[in-house]
Image (cartoon, coloured by chain):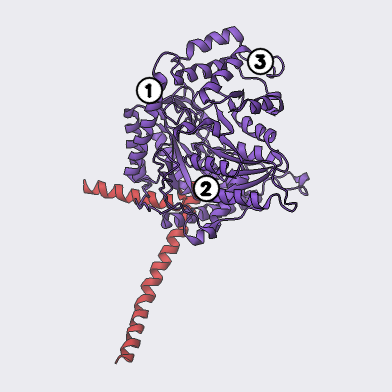
Amino acid sequence: MFPLKLGHCSLNKEIGVIVINSLWQQIPGGFGKIHHITQNGGLYKRPFNEAFEETPMLVAVLTYVGYGILTLFGYLRDFLRYWKIEKCHNATEREEQRDFVPLYQDFENFYTRNLYMRIRDSWNRPICSVPGGKVDLLERVSHDYNWTFTYTGKVIKDIINMGSYNYLGFAENAGPSKIPVTKVLSQYGCGMCSTRQEMGNVDKHEELETLLARYLGVESALAYGMGFATNSMNIPALVGKGCLILSDELNHASLVLGARLSGATIRIFKHNNMQSLEKLLKDAIVYGQPRTHRPWKKILIIVEGIYSMEGSIVRLPEVIALKKKYKSYLYLDEAHSIGALGPNGRGVVEYFGLDPEDVDIMMGTFTKSFGAAGGYIGGKKELIDYLRVHSHSAVYATSLSPPVVQQIITTMKCIMGEDGTTLGKQRIQQLAENTRYFRRRLKELGFIIYGNEDSPVVPLMLYMPAKIGAFGREMLKRHIGVVVVGFPATPIIESRARICLSAIHTKEILDIALKKIDEVGDLLMLKYSRHRQVPLLDRPFDETTYEETED
Amino acid sequence: MDLKQMKDYIYWLYFQYLLVTCSYVLEPWEQSMFHTITITVVAMVVYTAYVFIPIHIRLAFEFFSQIFG
């Protein structure tokens, strides 16, 4: 829940590499991202304000200088370790395996050993309370520069929690779901020890799926015990050889893994860039499969609702328009957006006022807004029936634990207002208010903030490697817990702190947090923004920087 | 009071130097090594500038005054 960890630490290496490559290629033409504020008139029912402020040149140069210095010292330390001048803490190749493929010599290992280790204290902090609005942390110290940690036994109390994906504040040990969950626990026990297809299917699962289908506005739905596996195991069940996957470049590792496992051809379009997507679609239709030029069996577009590293919201109306135009399928991962967006918390589809029927595969997780565990897929009845039989995570995985199912049911009913209270509705409104307020204030303070103004994930740019560690430490000193993210989860120069807002944050808490962030921002000189908003006529799409993805 | 502000400001500048050069995350012995190198380089640049720039300026001045008479 709260671990201050290296973002999606598992984020696929290749994605990191792809992003970096494109970054390197973009540098001669001016630094990477271009601002854009666009409203594609006809399709959008509400203003769509999304901005990625350009990295200031000086900051980018200094960031590279910093990495240069750290790399030099890294080589020095590796040299000392190699000649046994200093003690080697990390894993090394074994003497008898010298002629085998080297395991610890690539850049990732060098990075972990010599750069990440120095600031490791800002990640993976153990917590010892409910990850609600405030959280208790175990105090720990390191006597060997972060190679090992020892716990002092003290607890740092009441840290303001700006790191959990607890969008609606349902990660709590009191509140509406406490009693029903305890009841279910005593009635059903804690685990089923079997799969859905064998002995693990209980009435609670059926209840959840019916409710879920109603909540999403789809014909049928299927719940799984693990969100990551929902993506990585269902995509292979849907597409295979001879199919084409069009995937956003910043898609989560689970989607990337699923796409790879499927054996389909994968082509990557630029993040949220509809021209890039349309070009790929057009090419796919015109040229068909490579060499044989047969038409593709299926074309699947994979996008996420909210991108957790950029805080951007998918341009769903345009994606759906393209999908319809080119007769392809759409897989929408609502891991972060379900519950967090839309007037009734039904995700990005409701946010844009679209019809859930238009999205072929609605995927999402229960880990974030619902404060539980697992994932789901919603869609047409035929699709769900097919997946129920063919998806690995439906066939082989143990079914969801009943207390977890009850937690999901209770929170979902609360969000839908079916429990007779307005608590859910209030929380959704509170979250939207918090998001707008917090993002506006941070912008006013002069920080570079990425993403959509309605996204509760707020990436605050830090850029320089020393500032990642310093920001985490200084914020913790001021009793605020934030997640800092660096390479490989982000491009190497775009390190950031990722602040996740929650409905449980009151205005007072947010004001305290803002005050402290302001203080730290002055101390670390983080206020990079130059407030230069360039209203482009249309979205930036430079044919020259577009890389063709070959298969 | 002013002295304290001055001290704070100098500390802040030093902190910025630490952050930008990433010596903030270095271990103490590495840090002292890095500072030594930086100080040496800066001192040499300053000294060279002090020694050579006046000479060059004088030579340039003489050269141009010969041309333009």
Q: Which residue matches tag 1?
A: A426
Residue A156 appears in the picture as rendered: no
Q: Which residue matches tag 3?
A: A201
Residue type for callout 1: Gln
- How many neighbours does mark 1 have within 10 angstroms: few (below 14), some (14-19), or many (20 or more)? some
Q: CA distance from mark 3 to mark 2?
A: 42 Å
Q: Chain of mark 3?
A: A
- In the image, residue B60 above or below residue A524: below
Residue A102 appears in the picture as rendered: yes
Residue type for callout 2: Met
Q: Earlier in the sequence, mark 1 or mark 2?
A: 2
Residue A93 image position (x, y, % from top left): 71, 45
- In the image, residue A98 above or below residue B36: above
Q: Are marks 3 and 2 on the same chain?
A: yes
Q: Which chain appears red?
A: B
Residue type for callout 3: Asn
Q: CA distance from mark 1 to mark 2?
A: 34 Å
Q: Residue at x 40, y 15 (%)?
A: A421
Q: Which residue matches tag 2?
A: A274
Mark in front: 1 vs 2: 2
Total numbered circles:
3
- In the image, residue A524 above or below residue A179: below
- State the SS at label 3: loop
- In the image, residue A183 above or below residue A523: above
Residue A12 image position (x, y, % from top left): 61, 42
Q: CA distance from mark 3 to mark 1?
A: 34 Å
Q: Earlier in the sequence, mark 3 or mark 2?
A: 3
Q: Residue at x 33, y 82 (%)?
A: B58
